[in-house]
Amino acid sequence: MVISMKLGATREQVEHVCKRIEDFGYKVHSIRGEERVVIAAVGSGDVTHCVESLQAAPGVESAVRISAPYKLVSKQYQAEKSRIRVDSATIGGDDFVVIAGPCSVESEKQILTTAHAVAKAGAKMLRGGAFKPRTSPYDFQGLELEGLKLLRRAREETGLSIITEIMSDKDVELVAEYADMLQVGARNMQNFALLKSLGKAGRPVMLKRGLSATIKELLMSAEYVVAHGNPHVVLCERGIRTFETATRNTFDIGAVPVLNELTHLPVILDPAHATGKSALIPPLARASVAVGADGMMVEVHPCPEEAFSDGAQSLTIEQFNTMMEDILPYIKLWKDVRAAAALARA
Ligand code: PEP
Ligand code: MN
């Protein structure tokens, strides 16, 4: 349920409504917007009875049952897009945030060379896996702690914020110590123990859409993190599994406008994992800006041929530079459109 209080509702009225909600067995999350107080009631109980009762309570403008099972991440709960601060970068704000780096952290030279190059080309965040979710147990599994330390070094040298994957709830404290943002990979989108533990991680989370997950399931997973105490979540569309075999996955770019209608969480796109082919990234990068995403994640490697993982979808440094120049006019347009929309709302 989402309860919108009337403009000028008193504190006593808000407290009364919160108490009623709790009496019905729900948990209260309230936000105080610039104009009015909005309350979300989360949990299970007699929804119909509760809604009718609240509609009759003093100071209540509206009480609606949300048919979708996600609440805290919904647009009804918060109409404005969330701005997620990740150290020096903000996702969901006035910038189209480019996250770049290798699939895996492989060596000091590899990560530092990449970090300096992508920072120079305008990336705001550095990616690189230290814990790698590989289909085969015989494939490179990541440098783990050593990889985290190398990412820290890259951060110190370049000022880039660091995002890296977390695979287990047991590693939250460790990875959060080194990373500015924690990435939940597609394979772990429904690792509910992990999602719950991220509620208390103290770091923003980027949640990637599962290989065969619906948009509703993605939002339900985000709801887990938010409901457990961490509202700083960014969603990432990285391709889904379909009957098509020409690309590694099928890039569901339509997920962006759909998500922008359903949720206030920022959305970024990952054309690298979506297609598996570096040649397809530049055109899809342009499309990612144009479709209204809040940013993009791409893989970059100084020598893709020698990459320990995902070389075929990794851009060389030169290709990354060209792509960044190529998307500049699109980003300018993106900024103009956002500024015009903000003016129209004001
Ligand atoms: C990654 O970002 O390197 C990765 C493993 O992505 P995904 O979880 O989307 O496959
Ligand atoms: Mn990868």
Image (tube, rainbow, N blue to C red):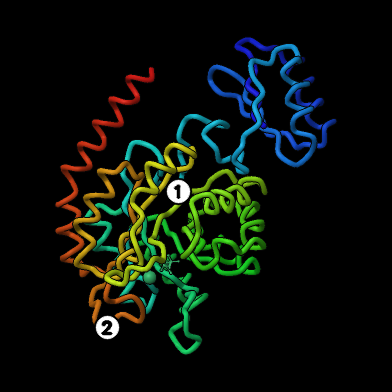
Asked if the residue at label 1 sits under 8 Å from ligand 1, the reply is no
Quarter holding residue 285: bottom left
Q: Quadrant of the N terminus?
A: top right
Residue at 58% of width from left, 53% of height from top? 221
Q: Could one spot residue 159 in this view of the protein?
A: no
Q: Position of residue 82 (x, y in %)?
A: 48, 37
In the rendered structure, find residue 306 and report the number of the disc placed on it: 2
Label 1 crowd (10 A; few <14 / some 14-19 / many >=20): some
Q: Is residue 53 above or below residue 44?
A: above
Q: Is residue 145 above or below residue 52?
A: below
Residue at 75% of width from left, 22% of height from top? 52
Is 209 in front, or is 338?
Answer: 209
Does residue 220 appear left or right of residue 156 in this picture?
right
Dot 2 falls on a residue whose secondary structure is: helix
Residue marked by disc 1: 87
Q: Give the image quadrant in which the ligand numbered 2 is located.
A: bottom left
Q: CA distance from mark 1 to mark 2?
A: 31 Å
